[in-house]
Amino acid sequence: PTPDVPAEQTDGYHLVVDALKLNDVETIYGVVGIPITDLARLAQAEGIRYIGFRHESNAGHAAAIAGYLTKKPGVCLTVSAPGFLNGLVALANATTNCFPMVQISGSSERHVVDLKQGDYEEMDQLAAAQQFCKAAYRVSRVEDIGRGIARALRTAISGRPGGVYLDIPAAVLGSIMDAEAGAKTLSRLVDPAPRQLPAPEAVDRAIEVLATAERPLVVLGKGAAYAQADDQIREFIESTGIPYVPMSMAKGLLPDDHPQSAATARSLALKKADVVMLVGARLNWLLNHGQAPQWNPDAKFVQVDIEPTEMDSNQPIAAPLVGDIESVFEALAERTKPGQIAAPTAWREELAARSAQNVAKMAERLKADKHPMQFMGALKAIRDVVHERPETYIVNEGANALDLARNVIDMHVPRHRLDSGTWGVMGIGMGYAIAAAVETGDPVVAVEGDSAFGFSGMELETICRYNLPVVTVIMNNGGVYRGDDVNPLGDAPAPTALMIEARHDKMIEAFGGKGYRATTPAEVTAALTEALASGGPALIDCVIDPSAGTESGNIGHLNPKGIGLTK
Ligand SMILES: Nc1ncnc2c1ncn2[C@@H]1O[C@H](COP(=O)(O)OP(=O)(O)O)[C@@H](O)[C@H]1O
Ligand SMILES: Cc1ncc(Cc2csc(CCOP(=O)(O)OP(=O)(O)O)c2C)c(N)n1
Ligand SMILES: [Mg+2]
């Protein structure tokens, strides 16, 4: 600068955008408003892709699954207070599922908030966020923006990934400082997710335990999918011959029709396995906490996880293998002697026989083509169409719509099934579908329960606005779990009832998308084939028998019993 030319200046808005770009953030998912509308405008003007949503929960779910798919933190941008709170379900869900994301929210004036003087959208957002995420930070000075962004991104992605909250008060966004000095406050992360190498003795201990197994089993969790160590994992499974079961989002890590898959003999595998190797899978409710009768009470556990405190959470772990999955499997490959770990043939044959029986039973169920259409008829049609298009992402939520689709729609490539995950949260559908399409450019089929769809259905407009290749397929059984509950006392709808005659296909037409109504599996096949060929937004309303479905799907036993509804 010279005396008559003022030094070039920058401000908080620009420093946020510069810091995000410096750290390879390419997309922001959000809902604009005070005080961050201009931040979204500037980000877009500077080349960051901005995807505008109708509700912050959906933007947050999109950011979370973007993180899961790309191994870079997804970024969600919200306004203060109510917008911030709307984002928290997704931030908490990301943390629960170990997806890396950062929620950036504008916030109100600190001096007004802290004296509770009644600011516009007054809330102590940092305090509120702490309990729902991996970490929460606030930037209080414009010169700290670069540090805050770097810290939030690194915390989200390193170690066990999760959701991070970054609070930026309006006053900080509006603060001005010398541009040269401002540029010096920015930094590019070096190695944001450092490899966590396993200790050699831990690797050897795990090999020993696996080598003694009569009936070994590998459980692949979504952590194994997230790690993107697909070749190393496949090599280990195939070289040892150990049977494996994939958790829902790990389906496709090895193709579901792989000869060592015990997915269709899951109960027998869990009950009889004597050594179980958990790979990026927590022994939580989804795995009955490792308890009998589902599990062999004498089973020994080997656990591979980046989070040391996960060990012994539910069962004693005989061989804790702490490290990132890629490094762990590289070390296992190095230190396992040829033939040292080999699954006995008898065990593999016992599981294969049970699988064959169960596959035959499923084939019978799939053939039953009653009218009105059943879940299985519609899901078989979807499976067959998607089977020819393995690059298609499957998003899935609901109760019966989730449980049945998980078993019917098999996967053949990694990280292509995105569902309600560890928390069983409804409402992930459209956000996950949008991010999968935006991040990959590949087609997405969202298989939605009719109730589940309702949580994010307004994003059909978002899908149409960006003309995304997303086909929403609704399993319309007219209710939460089913559509034939009745209110014993009068004609008000039962608590689980939705409109049987709902025409969801008309909804997408309101935004220029293509709507289809399918009452038979053949109509599902035709509609889905046409919709995928179009490459544009579409919705298929599958009219399903309202009496089809069980309460809470496979997890009805979680409902408390009490004395029952009749006094
Ligand atoms: N890169 C990684 N290396 C090792 N473990 C990981 C990695 N990423 C995530 N994890 C772990 O994977 C686990 C995921 O478990 P979970 O969500 O229960 O999977 P699922 O529900 O599919 O069984 C978490 O405990 C997390 O710490
Ligand atoms: C945020 C949130 N609110 C409520 C619920 C409780 C629930 C679990 S499953 C479900 C929907 C089941 O009906 P749907 O029609 O989608 O599926 P189907 O069985 O095929 O009829 C609800 C409302 C959850 N999990 N999360
Ligand atoms: Mg339903």
Image: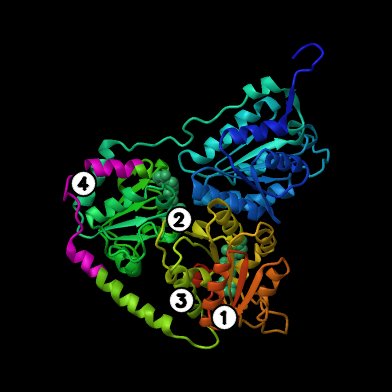
Of tags 4 and 3, which is closer to the observer? 3
Alpha carbons under labels 1 and 3: distance apart: 13 Å
- Judge: label 3 CB < 8 Å from ligand 2: no
Q: Residue at x 35, y 36 (%)?
A: 197
Q: Position of residue 6 (x, y in %)?
A: 79, 17
Alpha carbons under labels 3 and 2: distance apart: 21 Å
- Judge: label 1 CB < 8 Å from ligand 3: yes
Q: Position of residue 304 (x, y in %)?
A: 35, 47
Other-residue count near label 1 (Cα within 10 Å), few / some / many at <14 / 14–19 / ≥20:
many
Other-residue count near label 2 (Cα within 10 Å), few / some / many at <14 / 14–19 / ≥20:
many
Which residue is the site of mark 1?
Answer: 544
Of tags 2 and 4, which is closer to the observer? 2
Other-residue count near label 4 (Cα within 10 Å), few / some / many at <14 / 14–19 / ≥20:
some
Quadrant in which the N terminus is drawn: top right
Alpha carbons under labels 2 and 4: distance apart: 31 Å
The amino acid marked with disc number 1 is Ile
Q: Secondary structure at mark 1?
A: loop
Give the image quarter of residue 322.
Answer: top left
Q: Earlier in the sequence, mark 3 or mark 2?
A: 3
Of tags 1 and 3, which is closer to the observer? 3
Q: Which mark is residue 415?
A: 2
Quadrant in which the C terminus is drawn: bottom right
